[in-house]
Every structure is written in structure tokens, then in C-alpha cells.
Image (cartoon, grey):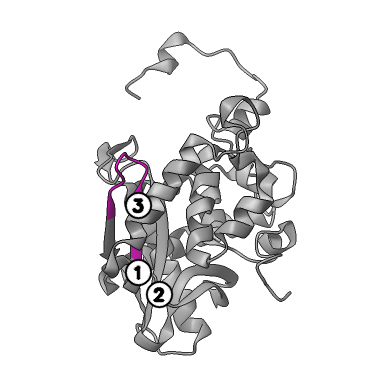
Amino acid sequence: MKLNNQNYFSPEANRKYMSVSQFKDFAPAWGGCEAMALAKVKGEYEPPLNMAFTEGHYVHAWNEGNLEEFKANNPDLYSSRGRTAGQLKSNFKHCNAMIEVLENDEMVMKVLAGQKEVILTAELFGVEWKIMLDSYNPDIKVFTDLKALRDIDGKFWNNEIHAYENFLERYGDLTQMAVYAEVERISQGRQPGDWCVPHMVVVTKQDPPDHEIMYFDYYIIESELSRVKKHIDRVLKVKNEKVKPVRCEKCEYCRSTKKITKINHYMEFDLYD
């Protein structure tokens, strides 16, 4: 199967390839749910689109140089009633403000320079992975991911480790950068450890928007690849239906398919568990 922009997110591609988002879907350590992830791969469940997802795609379309085409293909971006009929909805007008912040920063534009939406594949930990690089500059061994976030300084409580995390830890962005670096290296035939330097451009939805550029060192690549290696065997067994998936009973999929099998004592609902 030859991947392109039209079939990259297709059910067929998701069945054949592992991706970072799919891996995180399967891995509870990254907030995933095995039952939900398997249902997605089998085509039995499709999460509803949310506004944050569309806003992120709006900003990415600008980076690709396809913003006008994206707007033409998504009429829901525009108001359809009242005095604002035919105008961009207010949240997408704010996306334009986010884009303007990026365009007016010379360093940002340098980091985002290069080839756009580059698809690469490679075998990693016994399975074929697919990645899509937002911006790729192989001549200087750099790739960049573009993120639109609510804010940069947010804290997220992790009940498993009883500590706060930043957005990079919460959303598995460190894992993403590591896998992208390794798949890119393998696909280009370079020696182990000879990675491109991953960069990330972050722009926030605040008014006015904040923005930052960060890079990731080789230590975090090695560390996160070790974490992926630790979990990938279980993920593949569930994806290939060799073991029964575990339900988290908290996600949208589990709530929508929940069947009660026992009555719980009220103390089992302790808020501090």
C-alpha cells in the first residue's frame, strides 16, 4: 500500500500501519483505551469531530499553503444565519490571529521552512509505522511539528504517578517526537542514533495568542523509544485480536457501550482513588 495525502488516514492504512496517535489510543499509559482503539481500527467506532480538531486543521492548512482550499471545502467554518451569515465564525477568525502571530515571527518561519506534510514509513519494533512531518528540512537534518493549544503553561494531574504534567507529557508529544525521529532515520538509511533534531512550534488560542519554539535532544528520543518498546507488544496483541482488549469505562466509546454486570458499594467511588 503506497501512502499519500488522500489515503493516509484511511481505515486500510490504519489497519496496515501503526501510527503515534493509534499507539497512544491503545496504550493506557498515554491515556488510551484498548477497547476504543480496537473498535476504531475495525471501523466499529468513529469519534465525533470536535471544534479543537478543526481549529488545528485550519492552522495546519495554512502551514501547508492550502488554507483557501481548506476553507472552500469546509463550509461549516462560516456562519449561516443572522448578520454574520457568510462570514468566518469567531473562533476561526481567531485562528487567523494565531496565524498572523506565526507569520510575523522570523524565527518561526525559518523553523517551519521546508517540505510540507511529508509521509514516511519504516519498520520499528516489529511493525510498520507511518508518520507525517508538518515541515521537513533534511538538508539540515531538522523536522518541525506545529501545535495549536489552549495555553502553554497548563498543568494536568496524572492520577497514576500522583503528579502534575505539562502538555508535552499529557498529550504524548515527547513520544511523538521520538518515534518521528526514529522512523525518519530508518527510512533514510542512516546509522542508529543519527537523528534529525525534532522541533515544535506551539501557538495558543489565547487572546492575544502566545507562541514558542522548542527542540528535543537525543536523550528524550532514547528514553521515549524505550517506553514505546516496553508497551508495543501488548498494543500489537490487542490490535491483532490475540488478546481481549481492556475497557477503561471512562471514554466516550466505553460510556456508549457500557453494560452493568455488578452493583458496586458506594465506597468504590472514592474521589481520591
Location of residue 251 (image quadrant): top right
Circle 2 residues within 10 Å: few <14, some 14–19, many ≥20: some
Using the image as rendered, state which of residue 69 and residue 34 is in the foreground.
69
Q: Earlier in the sequence, mark 1 or mark 3?
A: 1
Residue kind at label 2, given as amino acid type? Ala
- Kindly report the distance in space between the C-alpha atoms of the residues bearing marks 1 and 2: 6 Å
Residue denoted by label 2: 113
Asked whether the beta carbons under mark 1 and mark 3 sit within 8 Å of each other, the answer is no
Location of residue 201 (image quadrant): bottom left
Asked whether the beta carbons under mark 3 and mark 2 sit within 8 Å of each other, the answer is no
One can see residue 5 in this view: yes
Task: Decide: is 116 above or below 103.
Answer: below
Q: Which residues are magenta?
A: 200-211
Using the image as rendered, state which of residue 269 and residue 79 is in the foreground.
79
Q: Residue 207: within the magenta?
A: yes
- Kindly report the distance in space between the C-alpha atoms of the residues bearing marks 1 and 3: 13 Å
Residue denoted by label 1: 109
Residue denoted by label 3: 203
Q: Residue furthest front?
A: 83
